[in-house]
Amino acid sequence: MGVLDGKIALVTGGASGIGLASARALAEAGAAVAIADLDADRGESTAKELVAAGARSLFVRTDATDEEQVAAMVGRVVDEFGGLDLALNNVGRGELGRTVTTTSLEKWNWILGMSLTSAWLGMKYEIPAMLARGGGAIVNMASSAGMSPQTTASPAYAAAKAGVVHLTRYAAKQYAAEGIRVNAVAPGLTLTPTVEAWFSPEAIAEQVSSGQFVERAVVPEEVAAAVVYLCSPAAAMVTGHTLPVSGGIA
Ligand SMILES: NC(=O)c1ccc[n+]([C@@H]2O[C@H](COP(=O)([O-])OP(=O)(O)OC[C@H]3O[C@@H](n4cnc5c(N)ncnc54)[C@H](O)[C@@H]3O)[C@@H](O)[C@H]2O)c1
């Protein structure tokens, strides 16, 4: 028996990194898992992997910043699986080496769209589907960069992720009486394909030794475990919170 047996989940950006690890962990805990991602090859292969492991799964190619596509994706999940109980709004992206004065308006808007608007858009369509089932649980992807100023993160990313933290708390208050819990996770530097492409092992070692109590990078499975907990009945009285998974920094 898994803690999420019979539940129906969706994960945006579920074909790589933290989203992929979370999709696997949600499926292992018993949930049917829909993968919503831009990358059709990796999305399809993730869904196939979960099915081969005994789960129900489905890939829906989706741009998480496009309202029509998000609405259609949630509709397809509800049609195919019969409803929606759990969602991880995981899509987000920053840029390297930018300060307040060297950020372009175009990149600012793109990063806000990817890292904050995508979480709101997801909730806009997930919440009505969950209300139709009498409740649900949502996890939004924040970041330690949105909890305290880290100048390795771009200002747009830091602001977007801080926005995710507050939006999470706001939505949690708005829908608590209707049975929907909304939380966030805030990973520290996590070894995903993007991070491994962006940073050398030396740069990763330097970042994790400046402020973290546990001086190593997070692995995606550690974030996924927090996601499963927040989705599970064990977290029934946990809502509006952002859970850091960051070795001791906020
Ligand atoms: N890796 C870290 O150190 C770290 C730390 C804190 C927070 N985060 C956050 O975790 C989340 C996942 O990061 P990751 O490092 O696992 O990323 P990743 O690059 O490994 O995976 C991102 C996935 O999102 C998909 N994607 C990109 N744009 C999309 C869009 N518009 N619509 C749908 N899918 C899209 C990609 O195809 C990919 O499968 C992000 O929100 C990121 O900001 C990451």
Image (spheres, rainbow, N blue to C red):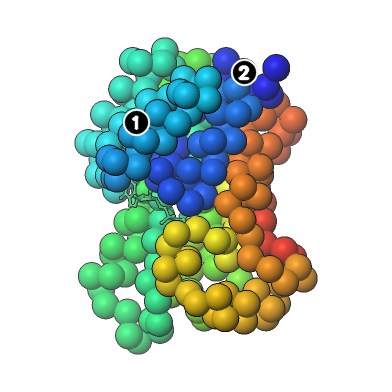
One can see residue 204 in this view: yes
User: Total of numbered circles in the picture?
Assistant: 2
Q: Position of residue 211 (x, y in %)?
A: 70, 77
Among numbered discs 1 and 2, the one appearing first in the sequence: 2
Q: Quadrant of ligand 1?
A: bottom left
Q: Which residue carries the number 2 mark?
A: 5
Q: Position of residue 46 (x, y in %)?
A: 41, 36
Crowd around label 2: few <14 · some 14–19 · many ≥20 (10 Å): some
Q: Which residue carries the number 1 mark?
A: 59
- Side of 197 where 170 appears, left or right: right
Q: Nearer the viewer, residue 183 or 179?
A: 183
Measuring 68% from the left and 68% from the top, which residue is drawn there?
A: 216
Q: Position of residue 37 (x, y in %)?
A: 34, 42
One can see residue 34 in this view: no
Crowd around label 1: few <14 · some 14–19 · many ≥20 (10 Å): many
The amino acid at mark 1 is: Phe
Q: Nearer the viewer, residue 45 or 225?
A: 45
The correct choice, above or below, for 134 with respect to 188 in the image is: above
The single residue placed furthest to the top in the displayed view is 82
The single residue placed furthest to the bottom in the displayed view is 101
